[in-house]
Image (spheres, rainbow, N blue to C red):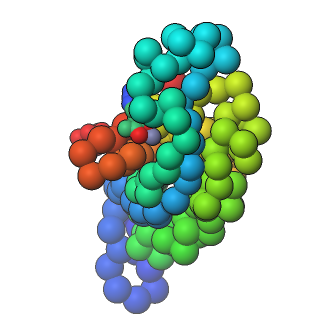
Amino acid sequence: MQTVAREGKLSPAGRVAFLSRTEIIAAAHRLNSKSLSDAENKKLFGKCNQSHGHNYTVMVTVRGEINPISGMFMNIYTLQEHMQEAIMKPLDHKNLDQDVAYFADVVSTTENLAVYIWESLQKCLPAGCLYKVKVYESDKNFIVYKGG
Ligand SMILES: CC(=O)C(=O)[C@H]1CNc2nc(N)[nH]c(=O)c2N1
Ligand SMILES: O=P(O)(O)OP(=O)(O)OP(=O)(O)O
Ligand SMILES: [Zn+2]
């Protein structure tokens, strides 16, 4: 279906684009499960059973139809604002296990951090537009979570 504005040609409706933004959060954590004994935690998590920190790189990808009038489906600054509220404010320069209630009983693995970020963003983004959360714990280690 063609949509033509008063001036200029417009892209046909129905084109889906994927918009991504990254932010870096510095956070401390300790891999420790309350369901395991101290000895089991030490055996399973090794040195990560001790408090340490990471500079996590978080990449959020949203998707939507390109608006034929504006040429976008979401202003990047809107995504930035949502990431500020859902990610930076609750997580940056925090101790995940002590300062974030979600991790009181959830092991602060990168997998669970990605789930937390997904669920936090779902509350503020339009339904269905969140596509992917990718979290790098280091240059080499990263997790991708797409919901479900
Ligand atoms: C390295 C670290 O500092 C960690 O905290 C690592 C240790 N291993 C590991 N394995 C996973 N599947 N997920 C993690 O988040 C993780 N953290
Ligand atoms: O996320 P997709 O499906 O676009 O695929 P990709 O670019 O391989 O990304 P990833 O491996 O991070 O899911
Ligand atoms: Zn770690």
In the rendered image, residue 115, in percent from the top left (x then y), is placed at: 55, 35
Q: Residue at x 44, y 24 (%)?
A: 45
Q: How many marks overall?
A: 0
Does residue 122 appear anywhere in the picture?
no
In the rendered image, residue 143, in percent from the top left (x then y), is placed at: 37, 37
In the rendered image, residue 116, in percent from the top left (x then y), is placed at: 60, 38
Q: Residue at x 41, y 25 (%)?
A: 46
The part of the image, by quadrant, that contains residue 57 is bottom left
Left or right side of 96 for 50 = left
In the rendered image, residue 95, in percent from the top left (x then y), is placed at: 64, 49
Q: Quadrant of ligand 3?
A: top left
Left or right side of 98 for 57 = left
Q: Eyeballing the image, is 98 above or below 21?
A: above
Q: Eyeballing the image, is 64 above or below 128?
A: below
Does residue 137 appear anywhere in the picture?
yes
Q: Residue at x 66, y 39 (%)?
A: 97
Q: Quadrant of the N terminus?
A: bottom left
Q: Quick one: which residue is furthest to the front in this view?
A: 39
Query: Viewer-proximal residue, 77 or 143?
Result: 143
Query: Viewer-proximal residue, 38 or 102?
Result: 38
Query: Viewer-proximal residue, 79 or 47?
Result: 47
Left or right side of 135 for 34 = right
Query: Viewer-proximal residue, 42 or 13?
Result: 42
The part of the image, by quadrant, that contains residue 142 is top left
Q: Eyeballing the image, is 145 above or below 78?
A: above
